[in-house]
Amino acid sequence: MVQSVNIPILDLAQQYANIEAEVSDAVLKVLASGGYIGGSRVLGFEQQFGAYIGVSECVVCNSGTDALYLALRALEIGSGDEVITTPFTFFATTEVISAVGATPVFVDIDPQTFNLDIDQLATAITNKTRAIIPVHLFGQPLNMTALMALASAHQLAVIEDCAQATGALWAGQKVGSIGHIGCFSFYPTKNLGACGDGGAVTTNDPAIAAKIRMLREHGSENRYLHTQIGINSRLDALQASILQIKLRYLDTWNQQRQAIAHRYHQLLNHIPGIVIPQELSGGQGVWNQYTIRLQAGERLGALSNNYRDKVRQLLQQQGVGSMVYYPLPLHLQPVYQNLGYQLGQLPVAEQACHEVLSLPMFPELSQEPQEQVIYSLKDCLSN
Ligand SMILES: *Cc1c(COP(=O)(O)O)cnc(C)c1O
């Protein structure tokens, strides 16, 4: 057993410590201003974030979940409509499809990238299909060129779930600026995280942006006149002021994540039983997670999920944090039993759920603790 260490999967306190003076100054100014909802900081952040992503329109809201919900509502997707998406993502991606009354249709993933398998997408399109929600999972961009070609051939809307991929590029363009609508989360663990909840919708379509603004304000364009059933979804001024500061650091932080991923690639290459994440040429990922596959091989055969979970437990005993994103694919969630999917129907996603393990990944992770992670991991594998 190697010496015990303490390396978390993510260290937000360390990030705050590095920008404490700027953030606390901004927060105190907002507190003293008395303006907590809306105002110049919220509008300023909308403008800056839209410019960063490279779109003409940005509408902020309360969360990534709300951003996705508002996007579907703005496209008037609802009862009787189908939306194609991935079973290997956070539940929010499909929860909103159900929340607007539409039906999620699941297509299996690509084993290399964990993202939707675009070659299989076409087989899922029916005359009820209205949209596709691709997810740039773990910060790796999907092949948007291929996806947009397919979508336009079938006249489908594309809503990019960019919650884990703020700043990622496909063919030189930021994700969230390629599809019809981009949806972002500022949940603290995302690449651009607030100190609380937050989200944004990006688009180049002013009509969609106007509709989303109306829907996020109780379906009201003019105060006390309601033309739709909307929701209340705001990014508050405190969060906006913090995000304005953090946005200035985002590219540096993403470069640090890329350097850490590169180091992981080198340290983990050629270790039997470990499959390292692949990047598509044409894309530049931002590594919200560094997710490996642990393959039990001869060790435990079919009980591969027990193997992964055992390794994770051993790592934890040595003080190395890790997470399983995600342990159960969405087509097999209890709430979706009524959709009628069977175990074995989307085998690549199901296998990923048994094998994946996300390792410590945050911009401040320095070389020595990162090498410790690998040292511990090798030790756990040989146990
Ligand atoms: C985090 C996340 C969301 C939801 O974002 P919230 O801000 O937590 O509501 C949606 N999709 C994916 C892929 C996510 O990782």
Image (cartoon, rainbow, N blue to C red):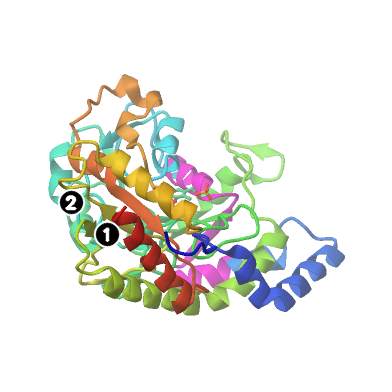
Q: Is residue 118 above or below residue 69?
A: below
Question: Residue 173 sits in which quadrant?
Answer: bottom left
Q: Is residue 64 visible?
A: yes
Of the residues under marks 2 and 1, which one precedes in the sequence? Answer: 2
For image coordinates 19% across by 51% down, the residue present is: 110
Q: Which residues are magenta?
A: 46-73
Name the spot of residue 142 as percent of width and height, x first: 27, 59
Image mark for residue 84: none
Q: Contact, CB < 8 Å: mark 2 with mark 1? A: yes
Given the current orientation, which residue lies at the most extreme top position?
338
Name the spot of residue 250 as percent of width and height, x first: 51, 74
For image coordinates 45% across by 65% down, the residue present is: 361
**SS at circle 2:** helix
Image quadrant where one finds the N terminus: bottom left
Image mark for residue 142: 1
Position of residue 238 in the picture relative to residue 291 (left or right):
right
Name the spot of residue 288 as percent of width and height, x first: 42, 62
Q: Is residue 158 visible?
A: no
- Residue at mark 2: 118
Report crowding for label 2: few under 14, some 14 to 19, many 20 or more residues within 10 A (C-alpha).
some
Secondary structure mostly seen in the magenta stretch: helix
Q: Is residue 127 above or below residue 372?
A: above
Specify the amino acid type for callout 1.
Leu
